[in-house]
Every structure is written in C-alpha cells, then in structure tokens.
Image: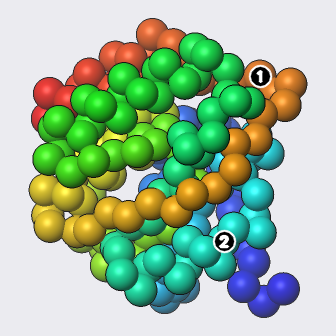
Amino acid sequence: MDNVFVLDLKFNKGKGFALRAGFDECLRRKCSIIVTLDADLQHDPEFIPLLLKKTETFDIVIGNRLNDVKLMPYHRRLSNRITSFMLSRKTGIKIYDSQSGFRAYTADVLKNVNTVMNGFEAESEILVKAIRDNFTVGFADIPTIYGNEKSKMRTYPAIKGFIKVMMS
C-alpha cells in the first residue's frame, strides 16, 4: 500500500479545511490525480477506477448518485436538487450531484484553484472557481448508498456557506 498515507489533523476545522490540507499534501507528494470520498460509507471505493478513467477527459469528475435516488432520503434529494440547480445556473454547466463528496481532481485544478471556505460548501466553491478558470467537469454514475449514519453537516452554517459561494 505504497500509495496510501494518513494525514491526522488532530482537530476538526471543517471539511473544506481538511480537503485543502489533503490536497496540499498530495501536491507536495506530486500526485497527478487526487480522489476524495466521504467517510460516511456512502461511496463504494470500487468505483474509483471509473472516476480515474474519466479524468482522461475531464479535470474534475464527480460521482453522480442522482440516477437512482430510491435509497436517498427525501430531504437529501431535495437539498441536492436545489443546490445542483443553483450551481448549474451560476456556472453555466449542468451540475448533476453537487453534494457528492466522491470526486477525482487533476493536480492542475488543485494547483490553480485557491479556496478559502472551511465547511461543507468548500466543494461548491471548488466547482465555481474551477469552472470560472475553464477547467472541465464530468460525472460518473455511482450507486446511492445510505445506511443509518448521521450527517455531521449543520444545516444553517451549511446554507450560509453555500450562499457565500453563490454570491462570489
């Protein structure tokens, strides 16, 4: 397992902060493609090769769970559809699953797109800034997996952060 390393941040400073710390470490290690997946077991790592393959065509690849939403709780489906619609309008490209944390990024994106948001809105910020800088975004269909896990996302701070991204 030479390609796996653990980055222990000691304190929870938010998802965006953790993503930036991981991206910085990957760039320091000269990784060419960086894959993220949330720790809530909602992403099947067996689909990583699919995301990697699509980076041959796209700079960012997002796992799209919205083709099969039977297992997705209604409130999650609704919030995802709303934020995906809003991001699509803002960026001018169709965003299918804005809330998926299962993504692959080329190193060029992470070298050139500087983010500041520390919460769950960080992934939206990356998309807005990357598309503004003419990076391409593609999607890979993945299964929707939901269990009994409890989200760590706090509704009002997440909404406030998303509004900041939309206003940028």
Q: 116 or 110: nearer the eye?
A: 110
Q: 61 or 158: nearer the eye?
A: 61
Q: Position of residue 155 (x, y in %)?
A: 51, 13
Q: Position of residue 66 (x, y in %)?
A: 54, 40
Quadrant in which the C terminus appears? top left
Name the image quarter holding residue 102. Answer: bottom right
Name the image quarter holding residue 161. Answer: top left
Q: 122 or 136: nearer the eye?
A: 136
Q: For mark 1, does the 10 Å Cα neighbourhood hold few (<14), some (14 to 19), or many (20 or more) residues? A: few
Query: Which residue is found at the position 69% from the left and 62% from the top?
Result: 7
**Residue under pointer 1:** 150
Query: Which residue is found at the position 52% from the left and 62% from the top?
Result: 140
Using the rendered image of the protein, determine whether residue 118 is visible from the camera's viewpoint. Answer: no
State which mark lies toward you, 1 or 2. 2
Q: 22 or 81: nearer the eye?
A: 81
Q: Position of residue 160 (x, y in %)?
A: 34, 17
Query: Which residue is found at the position 76% from the left and 57% from the top?
Result: 44
Quadrant in which the N terminus appears? bottom right
Left or right of residue 100, residue 96 in this image: left
**Residue under pointer 2:** 48
Q: Is residue 127 above or below residue 30?
A: above
Give the Cα separation between the discs numbered 1 and 2.
24 Å
